[in-house]
Amino acid sequence: MIFLAKIDLINVLPQFNEYLRIPYGVYQEIKGQAASLGIGVIGTIGVILMAKKRGYIEKPVVYLKKLKETGFRISDDLYQHAIRLAGK
């Protein structure tokens, strides 16, 4: 949520009210349990891509670039994959 706020995209979160948003540290502790229960997990990149898919934003690549500029840690491979998905 912090990085969504940093890139001026926090306003899309209410559109995803079917998801529970939790701090990353908590996520690290529960992700295995969530998977075993069949509960999906979505991160910051997923929120951006889903916001495009649902029509809340038009240019997700702009937000992906802003993430990197604000210090969001993401591997180059994942970043490039997200850029490709954002272009679809």
Image: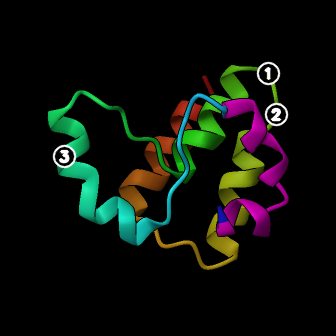
Q: Earlier in the sequence, mark 3 or mark 2?
A: 3
> Which residue appears farthest toward the bottom when viewing the image?
71
Q: Is residue 13 magenta?
A: yes
> Which is more foreground, mark 1 or mark 3?
3
SS at mark 2 in the image: loop
Query: What x and y, as percent, mark residue 6?
Result: 77, 70
Q: Residue at x 37, y 65 (%)?
A: 26
Q: Residue at x 72, y 20 (%)?
A: 54
**Which quadrant would the N terminus be assigned to in this image?**
bottom right
Q: Which mark is residue 67?
A: none
SS at mark 3 in the image: helix
Q: Which mark is residue 57?
A: 2
Q: Amino acid at mark 3?
A: Gln
Q: CA distance from mark 1 to mark 3?
A: 31 Å
Would residue 65 appear left or right of 26 to someone viewing this image?
right
Q: Amino acid at mark 2?
A: Ile
Q: Amino acid at mark 1?
A: Gly
State the extent of the magenta-drawn residues as a range. Answer: 2-16
Name above or below for residue 84 compared with residue 25: above
Query: What x and y, as percent, mark residue 51?
Result: 70, 32
Please tell me how crowded label 2 is: few (under 14), some (14-19), or many (20+) other residues with Cα within 10 Å.
Answer: some
Q: Which mark is residue 55?
A: 1
Q: Quadrant of the rendered structure where residue 18 is? A: top right
The residue that mark 3 highlights is: 33
Q: Residue at x 77, y 64 (%)?
A: 5
**Which quadrant would the C terminus be assigned to in this image?**
top right
Query: What x and y, as percent, mark residue 47?
Result: 60, 41
